[in-house]
Image (cartoon, grey):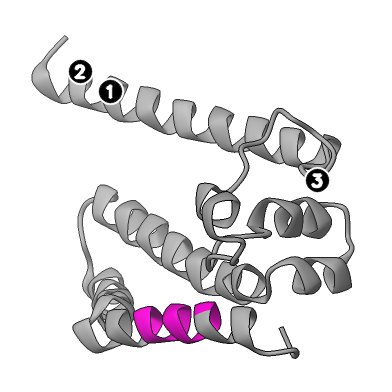
Amino acid sequence: MGASGRRILKISAVTATLVITAIAAVVLYTAIDPESSVFFPKCPFHMLTGLECPGCGSQRAIHSLLNGDIAAAIHYNLLIVLSIPYLLLLAILEIAKRIILSTKPLDRTKTKLLTAISRIIGFLYHGKAILTVIAIILLFWIFRNFSAAF
């Protein structure tokens, strides 16, 4: 087996591991309520300060989403509920980009599509986008601890 064959096997093994891990996580979070289970870790920041960090409630929110209770998920952690579409878009774009790059030859249509996908990814990963995400996280962190609305 040549170097390219070993590379494909390595990529396939990593992909399979990620897919199996994701499926296991979905099954686990669907079946077990993190609020009533000692299996899931508790937030050390919350335990030390009594305040909620931006991630507090995210395990319960994911459990609620997987069980179809959107209102409960929003109650537990609005930020995680709102960030899931953003993260899914990034994942879908990255996968599409890799699929296009793996299909040879790259014709004009594929090149245009790859350029469009790369521009969107560049916009979503741009420094201003990252700073905006950080600002949203910090504001959420402040408001959830010092506002009755959160």
* Vertical relation: 2 (above or below) 70: above
Give the residue displayed 88% in from the left and 60% down from the top. Answer: 68
Residue 120: image tag: none
* Vertical relation: 61 (above or below) 39: below
* Type of the residue with mark 1: Lys
Label 1: how many residues lie within 10 Å, few (<14), some (14-19) or many (20+)?
A: few
Dot 3 and dot 1 residues touching (CB under 8 Å):
no
Q: Residue 33: percent from the left, percent from the top?
A: 83, 42
**Helix, strand or loop: magenta stretch:** helix
Q: Which of the marked residues, 2 or 3, is nearer the chain's N terminus? A: 2
Q: Magenta residues?
A: 133-141
Label 3: how many residues lie within 10 Å, few (<14), some (14-19) or many (20+)?
A: few
Q: Which of the marked residues, 3 or 1, is nearer the chain's N terminus? A: 1
* Type of the residue with mark 2: Arg
Residue on which the image places disc 1: 10
Residue on which the image places disc 3: 35
Asked whether 55 or 70 is in front, the reply is: 55
Residue 6: image tag: 2
Instruction: Name the mark nearer the viewer: 2 or 3.
Output: 3
Spatial separation of the CA atoms under disc 2 and disc 3: 44 Å
